[in-house]
């Protein structure tokens, strides 16, 4: 009989923190693009007509999309440097905390990231929304460290 005190609930996705090398920890409201996809190579083996053999190929990673309320211009400056030919690669982590916010329950590391897209907020004088900026990061790899 299973014990009810050994229950493992799924991690909650609302308490997370993103760190980028030399930048202070950033409070992003959304993080998307935690995705890897492995290409599949079909191999039609001679004499075997009932199916194709399949082999794993290269694994590609999606760009990370980060959204936050505008609080300073550090992310803008990083992206603007790219437009001027100054490339600064940064490593980073995405940590998911427990509901109390204390312990890290899940963490990913990415490396050699640089911004590929920056989007500012829609501005509307008839609303009182927070100004949101979106930064899209290209990176060279993603691994789960916890």
Image (cartoon, rainbow, N blue to C red):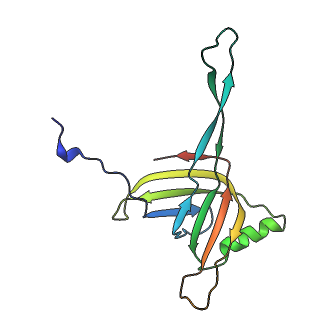
What residue occupies the far front of the structure in this picture? 50
Q: Is residue 54 above or below residue 85?
A: above
Q: Residue at x 64, y 78 (%)?
A: 121
Q: Residue at x 17, y 41 (%)?
A: 3
Q: In this view, does 103 lie above or below 126?
A: above
Please give left or right for residue 35 compared with residue 79 in the image.
left
- The x and y percentages for residue 122 are 64, 80
In the depicted view, which residue is nearer to us: 2 or 27? 2
What residue occupies the far left of the structure in this picture? 1
Please give left or right for residue 26 compared with residue 47 in the image.
left
- The x and y percentages for residue 143 are 56, 45
Q: Quadrant of the N terminus?
A: top left
Please give left or right for residue 6 compared with residue 118 in the image.
left
In the depicted view, which residue is nearer to us: 64 or 40? 40
What residue occupies the far right of the structure in this picture? 85
- The x and y percentages for residue 131 are 59, 81
The quadrant holding residue 20 is bottom right
What residue occupies the far top of the structure in this picture? 47
Q: Which residue is drawn at 71% across and 64% down?
A: 117
Please give left or right for residue 39 compared with residue 8 in the image.
right
- The x and y percentages for residue 63 are 65, 54
């Amino acid at each position: 009989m299973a014990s009810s005190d050994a229950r493992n609930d799924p991690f909650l996705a609302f308490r997370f923190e993103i760190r980028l090398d030399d930048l202070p920890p950033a409070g992003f409201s959304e993080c998307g693009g935690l995705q890897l996809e492995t290409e599949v190579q079909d191999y039609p083996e001679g004499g075997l007509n009932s199916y194709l053999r399949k082999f794993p190929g290269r694994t590609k990673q999606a760009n990370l999309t980060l959204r936050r309320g505008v609080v300073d211009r550090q992310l803008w400056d990083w992206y603007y440097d790219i437009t001027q030919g100054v490339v600064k690669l940064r490593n980073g982590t995405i940590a998911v905390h427990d509901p109390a916010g204390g312990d890290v329950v899940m963490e990913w590391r990415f490396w050699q990231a640089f911004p590929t897209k920056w989007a500012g907020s829609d501005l509307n004088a008839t609303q009182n929304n927070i100004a949101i900026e979106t930064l899209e990061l290209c990176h060279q790899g993603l691994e789960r460290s916890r």
